[in-house]
Image (cartoon, grey):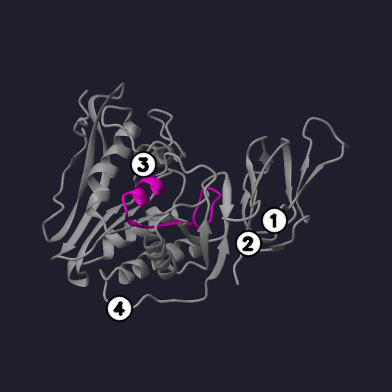
Amino acid sequence: MSTTLPPSPIVPTIPFDEDGVHRGFLRLPISRDESAWGAVMIPIAVIRNGDGPTALLTGANHGDEYEGPIALQALAHELKPSEIHGRVIIVPFMNTPAFHAARRISPLDGVNLNRCFPGRADGSPTEKIADYFLRHLVPLADIVLDYHSGGRTLDFLPFAAAHLLDSAVQQDACIAAMRAFNAPYSMTLREIDAVGMYDTVVEEAGKTFVTTELGGGGTATARSAGIARRGVRNLLKHAGILEGDPKIGPSLSIDTTVGDCFHICEKAGLLEVLQDLGDPVSEGDPLARIWPVDHVGADPVTVQARNTGILAARHFPGLINTGDCLAVVASVLQ
């Protein structure tokens, strides 16, 4: 049985190995009602100045998260080849169909890009995007930054994150890059389910990888966008692509690799939060009340913290359903 993978249908409209600034698209053919021989056009910029490290920078892996697109649009507009050594590949709207629809998942096929890696060249549109990034862009990179925030359903403390990895050398490189990004919080992260994530396949490829959660609620603030913009330049300086040293300020180290950090809702209703982001929390403290919405005067369900630390994430909308992530209580590292 042949193990040869089919070629990707995605075609870049710009070169990757020529010096200068190149702005164009990754063109994915797709036939649909609105355009029989149409294409999804994913904007991309490549800025190169000679030999040196390559940074791959992505935003809008989920289409309702905006700090990454803001920071990367600004960087693509401002960055000059004379400022760098090496190459910067910028994709502000990695999941372009979801971004234009302001949705977490793609409206074209209902697939979550950040849960479908390694993707398939002969799969759905989202699987084709995943396949192209993994097979054609990730191999070019030495360091990868993928921006995230909470989208419409979560709100986070602004943190950069690195994962625990089997390779101590690679993990140390990821943690050093995370600290160089210098968000107000630096998270050592355990995912609830890492299967199919961009993070996982990039790390398995041996790359230095940094991700973020910089806010939420389906919008960006002046503060969160500013953290995103400063962080990417810090990361490029850390990688030796931009000259100078990262601008480093205080960053509290937090952790979700130990303890019972993730609190999943077991009762639908009206959410009354009892702790704000960044508040100190002790095990047993009340995190939230969930009030019934089908009648009046009944007792609420009180959700208690199962971990000691600080509130790092919370459900954003006022109504919550069974199975939603209600809160994340991260441990504080001394």
Query: Is there CB contact under 8 Å for labels 4 and 3?
Result: no
Query: What residue is rendered at 41% in x and 61% in y?
Result: 168
Q: Earlier in the sequence, mark 2 or mark 3?
A: 3
Q: Earlier in the sequence, mark 1 or mark 2?
A: 1
Q: Which mark is residue 307?
A: 1
Label 1 crowd (10 A; few <14 / some 14-19 / many >=20): many
Type of amino acid under label 4: Gly
Query: Is there CB contact under 8 Å for labels 1 and 2?
Result: yes
Is 116 covered by the magenta stretch? no
Q: Which residue is mark 4?
A: 244
Q: Earlier in the sequence, mark 4 or mark 3?
A: 3
Q: Which mark is residue 320?
A: none
Query: What residue is rendered at 34% in x and 68% in y?
Result: 233
Label 4 crowd (10 A; few <14 / some 14-19 / many >=20): few
Q: Is residue 123 left or right of residue 27?
A: right
For marks 1 and 2, give the CA distance. Answer: 8 Å
Q: Secondary structure at mark 1?
A: loop
Q: Earlier in the sequence, mark 4 or mark 1?
A: 4
Stretch of the chain drawn in magenta: 198-221
Q: Secondary structure at mark 4?
A: loop
Type of amino acid under label 1: Asn
Can you give x and y, in whole percent of width and height, for residue 127 in the image? 33, 33
Can you give x and y, in whole percent of width and height, for residue 306 in the image? 72, 52
Can you give x and y, in whole percent of width and height, for residue 7 in the image? 19, 33
Q: Which mark is residue 331?
A: 2
